[in-house]
Image (tube, rainbow, N blue to C red):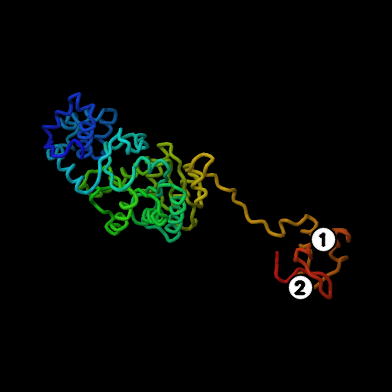
Amino acid sequence: MRGLEGTEMGVDAMTDLRHEELRTSREGRLAVRLALAATVEPADKTMTPRLRALDPFTAWEMVRTDAGGKFTRAAARVKTLRLETVVARTQELGARIVIPGDDEWPCGVDDLESPPYCLWVVGKGSLARACERSVSMVGARAATPYGTQVASELAYGLSGRGFTVVSGAAHGIDTASHRGALAAGGCTVAAMACGIDIAYPLANTGLLQQIEQSGLIVTELPPGSAPQKQRFLSRNRLIAAMTPGTVVVEAGLRSGSRSTATAASRLGRLLAAVPGPVTSPASAGPHQLIRDCGATLVTDVDDCAELFGAIGGDLADPKRAEPTVFDRLEDADRRLLDAMPVVRGTTVERLAVSAGLTPREVTRGLAALHAAGLVERIESGWRRTQDQSS
């Protein structure tokens, strides 16, 4: 890690970070942000509000000294903090640490009430560029076959149109979304609720290896951080913030996916949801988002691309049913066809009475319908052709 290799930087050395020259250097900003990320839990509801309006150097000084006895929760971590160990482990993993001001920093996360102090990233390409044209796809771990199919198809299609698919690498909808993007040869980003050195869930180890090869894996937690429940909730806010919008494919009324949707709404991001069977509990969440939370109903790739893509550049064609031969008929000819028997033949006179048309209109209409192959002449008169019923 540039500027920190071989540094024996424990808590005592970190007091030097107050110096002005360190405040203006990337190395100093990186060190203090690493220290905060390693000692302050992202979802801590006691400490993070107290640090929210502070610059990282002031925040670290308060955490390091347990100012006012308000940061005692971090004391054990502060005592054992060794930045050189964190940096060495990051390098060993082939990862990199990104901080605000770096070209790779995804600016969307700055909209968060409590942005991450830094991000650990592994994989090819730039995280910032990957997030420019992107969409978050989230949903239930216990996804239905319907949900996984829809997620795969949406991710495949969006990836083919140049969107990065961002998700959380969990079972169910997340996995289907990542796999869909990979199948299309596109970029996908996995946001993790653990350290960059931990594959979670374990069953997705192979998937995460694939993502690392052609996409990116990102986390705000230092190496060695285990997946814990509250970390999934804090991770969800990153998924919502990194992209212009979020699609919820399947989710229960209480789920982590709903927390991502809530974060997206609070950030002013676009929110979409996929409808499903009204009998499916897995679709109850998306239905409520559409009904009560202003989520846009999306059903296919065209809908998503138009919603999340460039204004005017990703417009979807209006959805219309294909016109039938019946739609192209004149009104009088449609009435005549409606009055036409299917089995037995009938006469012009009877058709005039049944359809409420003049004999001349019937004669002219029969000629048009016969030319279109919709009626035929048999011994007993006129009837519909046998190979059509509309």
Where is residue 172 drawn, in percent x and y?
37, 57
Left or right placement of residue 274 versus residue 169 in this view: right
Q: Nearer the viewer, mark 1 or mark 2?
A: 1
* Secondary element at image label 2: loop
Q: In the rendered structure, are the residues bearing label 1 and label 2 in contact, judged by CB atoms less than 8 Å apart?
A: no
* Secondary element at image label 1: helix
Three-letter code, disc 1 = Gly
Where is residue 103 drawn, in percent x and y?
32, 36
Splitting the image into 4 quarters, where does residue 351 fall? bottom right
Mark 1 = which residue? 365
Q: Residue furthest top?
A: 20
Left or right placement of residue 49 versus residue 84 in this view: right
Mark 1 packing: few (<14 Cα in 10 Å), some, or many (20+)? many
Mark 2 packing: few (<14 Cα in 10 Å), some, or many (20+)? few
Q: Residue furthest bottom?
A: 379
Residue 167 appears in the figure: yes
Mark 2 = which residue? 343
Splitting the image into 4 quarters, where does residue 36 fall? top left
Residue 282 appears in the figure: no
Front-most of residues 243 and 294: 243
- Closer to the chain start, of discs 1 and 2, is 2
Three-letter code, disc 2 = Val
Front-most of residues 44 and 364: 364
Where is residue 257 drawn, in percent x and y?
38, 48
